[in-house]
Amino acid sequence: MIKNILWDFDGVILNSMKIKGDGFIELFKEYDEMYLNKLEQYHYDNGGVSRFEKIKYFYNEILQKDITEREVIEFADKFAEIINKNLFNPSNLIEDSVSYIKENYKKYNFHIVSGAEHNELNELCKYFELAEYFISIDGSPTKKDVLVKEVLEKFNYKKNETILIGDAITDYEASMANGIGFYGFNNLNLNKFGNYINYFNKKDIFEAI
């Protein structure tokens, strides 16, 4: 029986992948298009990876250059400035999942574990008036598998009563690393892992599980 549901944010509650993809291109616009195309592909292939890790990947793996932690933070701050004008747009909310959350938050223990930057994530949830539906809201730079582990330990949840809903392979990996169930959403490539949500409907899809 499912009692605890951990939610990813980007791609599950808010459609922000393109906003952030465009943001990375703007952030590193002085670099050759070949490098930017590789970064853009990495971004879309790794939805649950934080901006901090994507910036490191761009430098270390694509440019084959070193980057300091301070520089990563500086780039992340610039990135936030670039995407902010589009991120706080209610039209980007995924109505299907938001409606489900509002209708069922009293039946389950809802938490957010996201690759989105922690402070920005909390600001978004308050701005969209979603914070009240979640017991905790946690984001990067802490990695997702660690966030999941911390929620399980802090709230003493049983693993067989807990699932994570996500739209990326990193969400699946974080679930497996912590021994909890995984449900894919908004990414048909996740069908191969078994449990997949095509859409939320009025009947609670987890009721009989």
Image: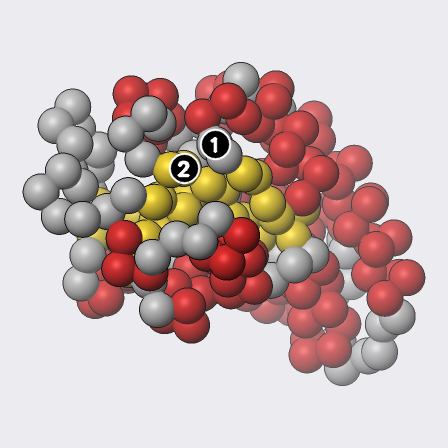
Q: Element type at marker 2?
A: strand
Distance between mark 1 and mark 2 Cα atoms: 5 Å
The answer to whether any part of residue 107 appears in the image is yes
Residue 12 image label? none
Residue 110 image label? 2
Q: Callout 2: few (<14), some (14-19), or many (20+) C-alpha neighbours within 10 Å?
A: many
Q: For mark 1, what is the residue?
A: 134
In the rendered image, the vertical position of residue 31 relative to residue 122, given as above or below: below
Sequence-wise, the earlier of marks 1 and 2 is: 2
The three-letter amino acid code for the residue at tag 2 is Phe
Residue found 28% across the figure and 29% down from its top: 107
- Residue 193 placement: quadrant: bottom left
- Residue 52 placement: quadrant: bottom right
* Side of 107 relative to 31 (left or right): left
CB contact under 8 Å: marks 1 and 2: yes
The three-letter amino acid code for the residue at tag 1 is Phe
Residue 136 x, y percent position in the rendering: 54, 38
Q: Element type at marker 1?
A: loop
Is 179 or 199 nearer to us in this picture?
179
In the rendered image, the vertical position of residue 114 relative to residue 39, given as above or below: above
Residue 194 x, y percent position in the rendering: 18, 63
* Side of 70 relative to 193 (left or right): right
